[in-house]
Image (spheres, rainbow, N blue to C red):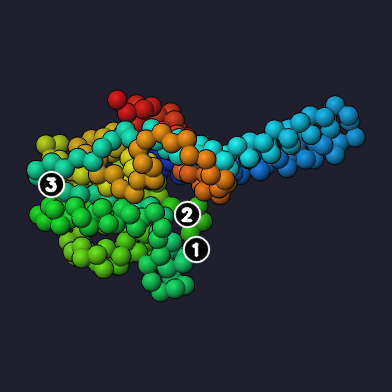
Amino acid sequence: MSIAASRPRIIKEITCMGFVLSKLFWVFMSPGNCLTLLLVIAAFMGLSHREACRNVGRRACFGIALTFFLIGILPVGEWALLPLENLYPAETPREVAGIILLGGDEKAVDGVSKDRPIYLDSGRRYIEFASLVRRYPDAALVYAGGNPELTPHTTMRDGDIAKHALAELGVPVEKMLSENTSRNTHENAVMSYKLVHPEKSQTWLLVTSAYHMPRALLTFQKVGWNVLPAPAGYLTTGQFSGHLQFNLGEHLLEMGWAFHEYYGLLAYRLMGYTDHLWPN
């Protein structure tokens, strides 16, 4: 087999490996998991027979415990989300050729067990999408998203859940194109572009969570799609806040969302999925 003939297979294997590695990386590097693993390591070091190792372990335990305490009090997750959410205001051009909705956290397994659509953050995207569909009734509609799980436990796709939910919001899902094989933002862009083949002169709106918009917009622009931002589901007020509230779970969750995007921006730039590390 020639190198040219084997290139698509090689690219597919590299893409698949990158997807698996990104999932494994996030298991260990999400803020809550990372701090917990470091705390466990420090605790074992504190039990060492060597005094120097015990001292390091005890100091590390104190430092990590203090870090958890500060995260619980300070709105660090909100601070981390602000640059992402403030980067792109919503744009409402007079006319658009189409509207793209990116899948998010649809719960396919839960949906099968409960026989109804189950979703969390995606609900905010659905509402924004439905609002834009009413504003632009002649626009083409595209949903992009398969099953982002590393080991899917059901054949149901995110697009199946989205159609049920969007139909209840009055969206004419019968005219919506669904790309239901992509597993991440890069594949969302590449596969939906191949499905639609948009013209460069056309203007499209891209609907996704506000904190995810910088990476999504850069990725779609990389494949040659002329998209404008239509952010949904803001998690911050858009202004710096010094409000103190002891809520470790919520702050870690917000940090997780923000850090996931910062890691993603770096990884996508290194892999060539975007042209810039940070949007201009």
Q: CA distance from mark 3 to mark 2?
A: 31 Å
- Cα distance between the residues tagged 1 and 2: 8 Å
Residue 91 is left or right of residue 42, and the answer is: left
Mark 3 or 1: in front is 3
Q: Which residue is mark 3?
A: 97
Residue 279 x/y as whole percent: 32, 28
Q: Residue at x 40, y 74 (%)?
A: 115
- Mark 1 and 2 residues: CB-CB less than 8 Å, in contact? yes
Q: Which mark is residue 149?
A: 2
Residue 144: in sight, yes or no? no
Task: Choose between 243 and 253: the one closer to the eye.
Answer: 243
Q: Are marks 3 and 1 in contact (CB under 8 Å)?
A: no
- Where does residue 68 sit, x and y in percent of width and height? 63, 40
SS class of the residue under badge 1? loop
Cα distance in 3D space between marks 3 and 1 = 36 Å
In front here: 204 or 2? 204
User: For mark 1, what is the residue?
Assistant: 153
Q: Quadrant of residue 41?
A: top right
SS of the residue under disc 2: loop
Which residue is rendered at x = 27% and y = 57% of the image?
A: 127
Query: What amino acid is found at the position of numbered circle 3 in the picture?
Result: Ala
Q: Position of residue 94 (x, y in %)?
A: 9, 43
Closer to the chain start, of discs 3 and 2, is 3
The kind of residue tagged 2 is: Glu
Total count of labels: 3
Residue 225's x, y, as percent?
A: 22, 38
Q: Residues within 10 Å of mark 1 (few under 14, many from 20)?
A: few
